[in-house]
Image (cartoon, rainbow, N blue to C red):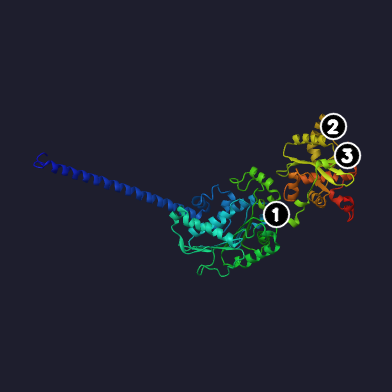
Amino acid sequence: MSGLFEGLSDADLENIRDSANIAAENKRIAKQSQAQEARALARQEKEEKARKKRRAKSKHDFSYFCQTYMPDAFTLVFSEYQLALTRLAANRNLNRQDEALFKELIDPRDHGFIKQPISGEYEGILDIEPRDHGKTTRNTQAMPLWLALNHPGSFIVICGASADSAKEMMDAIKDDLEDNELILDDYGEQRGNTWTKRKIKLANGSSIVAVGRGQRLRGIKNKYQRPTHIICDDLLDDKEVESPTLRRQAERWFKRVIMNLGKGALTIIANTIMHPDDLPSRLLNQIEDGRLPNWLGLRFSAITPSGRPLFPSRWSLQDLENKRIASGSAWWTEWMNRPIADEDADFKEDWFVYFKPYELDLRDCTIGMAVDPATGLKKGDWSFIAVVARHKITMVDHVLFAKGWKESDLQFAQRIVDVYLQHRPSFVMFETVAFQKIYKKEVMRYAKKKGVRLPVREFKGGNKQVRIKSLSSQVENGLIQFLETQTLLRQMFLEFPRGHDDGPDAVEMAISGFESGFMGGAVPQTPRPIRSAAQTLSRFGGGALSRILR
């Protein structure tokens, strides 16, 4: 080996060593580069595989698309009904499992709107959901994106209450197509030649148009293509829905314009019912009587018939109870989709007259008490006690006490006696069957312990709704007055006949008790017939009311 380098200078040897080192380094770099390229290729292949997997799953799973590509908008687990709705919209038919699910979640009164299509697939879906259940984001933003990206060539029309609301819907869709990195990575740049506030055309051939109610759409096309999907969201706002003229115009525009956009399109209407005569209410009636064949009507309430929340990951039962208290009479409109038109309400907010306790001299009054216990027949009922003072001269009834509880029979039996001791009424009205079967023994036992005998009168008052409704004119004319603190009772009156009626029932029973004429301190052996408030009201002629109020 030494002979090999014999005669070479130190400089030559140094050059040889440098060359060898450079060659080794180049070889190392080349090997490292190859490894990096291999890893990059493997990563690309892995990403491409994941991309294909995401796109393949998204094409057939709308909920997966939402939670994968729009995680900020869909932070909660989809509810059962929402998953069923996505399958319905994707397939345009209703499988038996989802039909059974809808009937479980929807009030039996509305099962007549759940019909299988005659032609094999649906032409329209009426999706009526409560407030804050995600219908707008799901239907007007995610659904058009999902259709346009996963089903190239789709032509989607979205409709809002106004041109401004339509523009907001379109802006949200364009934002995702332009700035959503995962959509850009998986579906590529989709901005096409048409990209306006009203219409966009994607690179894959899909198009989306956004319009407001009343705008002209006749003849709208994507070249020679008619719309494949039409999605409408709340076509009337909260104020407009009170106008009969605007309600008629909305239906006329929908029938003349939207339903004539193109044969074969699937129309989806996402709405909350705001009035018994609004567009979705009219469409429900037309579905039921067969005027809209191949349409499906689904009316959901925030609380299902079994007492469970419709969207449990968003709203617990306690959350909904709090919302019900805060919403007042609006609860049945915005959360249960069962509105009562103002003109049809049996009791109105501005009818209620309030008195101050210090304004009433109880020495001038006769006091009666009524008990309406929860019998367990209706889930969520209150056990309610009302105490009413009737002024002997004006005949005006003042609700001194009105409160409800959800507690055991034993606790409520004791509470009855405690309330009696607090107010000392001349009589205590009690529904006959409930008193005899459930409460008589416990009430008598606890009353004896307290050293009193309750003047209980057993009550047989007939139809509860008729009796409560008979109080309407008396409330309107100030013949029944309340304390401002009686919020639960007032809410029950305003929601009647939709909600719980335990409080109004107890008030009506107490008022009916004044008609027996018996004011003794013990239970009478042969009491005179007790007239209901409805019977009492019929006795007042045209001038009688003014004489009473003089």
Determine the CA span between mark 3 and mark 2. Answer: 21 Å
Q: Residue at x 29, y 46 (%)?
A: 32
Can you identify the residue that label 3 sits on?
363
Q: Which amino acid does label 3 sit on?
A: Arg
Determine the CA span between mark 3 and mark 1. Answer: 43 Å
Most foreground residue, 435 or 258: 258
Classify residue 68 as left or right of residue 364.
left
- Dot 1 or dot 2: first in sequence order is 1
Q: Helix, strand or loop at disc 2?
A: loop
The residue sitting at the front extreme is 359
- Dot 3 or dot 1: first in sequence order is 1
Q: Can residue 120 be seen in this view?
A: no
Q: Where is residue 349 in the image (x, y as percent from the top left)?
A: 75, 51
Q: Residue 452 carries which label?
A: 2
Can you identify the residue that label 1 sits on?
339
Q: Residue 482 carries which label?
A: none
Classify residue 37 as left or right of residue 6.
right
Q: Quadrant of residue 410?
A: top right
Q: Which residue is drawn at 89% across and 55% down?
A: 541
